[in-house]
Amino acid sequence: MTDYTLTQLSDAIQKSFARYDQQGTRHWTWQVAAQDLIYQIGSLHKVALQLSGDRWAHNKSKEVLEAEFKDELADIVAVALYIAAERGIDMNQAMDDMFASDQQKVADRT
């Protein structure tokens, strides 16, 4: 298992997604990826419902469903990082800003 930094992960995702053009689909822009993000979140939700027994699981075992859940979650992270890279967003800085904002919100409320 590779322990990526956000920058390394983002670079690997950019290279992986660049290969999509070779299969004959349109080039993925951040806008296309944002539409796919919604699809990926729906896929994660479906598996979550299957795991809880609230949706038919097609006779899949818990182990298979857990693997699908992990895969869908990874897809969401990949698409989010791709969008950030395409928009020129430094996710390390974005995370720092988000943590600082969250800490301020908690401080203001307590």
Image (cartoon, rainbow, N blue to C red):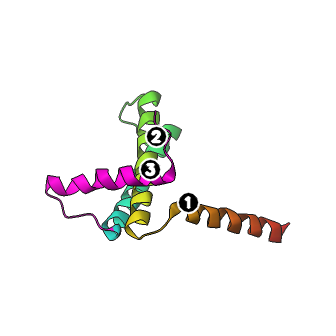
What is the C-alpha distance between the residues marked 3 and 2? 20 Å
Q: Amino acid at mark 2?
A: Lys
Q: Determine the residue positioned at 69% across, 68% down.
A: 101
What is the C-alpha distance between the residues marked 1 and 2? 23 Å
Q: Say whether residue 36 is left or right of residue 70.
A: left
Give me the disc on residue 70. 2
Residue 40 shows up from this direction: yes
Q: Which residue is mark 1?
A: 92
Q: Earlier in the sequence, mark 1 or mark 3?
A: 3
Using the rendered view, name the quadrant where residue 39 is placed. bottom left
Q: Which residues are magenta?
A: 1-29
What is the C-alpha distance between the residues marked 1 and 3? 11 Å
Q: Say whether residue 19 is left or right of residue 76.
A: left
Q: Amino acid at mark 3?
A: Gln
**Contact between labelled residues 2 and 3, with CB atoms less than 8 Å apart:** no
For label 1, the SS is helix
Q: Determine the residue positioned at 23% across, 52% down.
A: 19
Q: Is residue 32 above or below residue 57?
A: below
Q: Which residue is mark 3?
A: 8
Q: Position of residue 92 (x, y in %)?
A: 55, 60
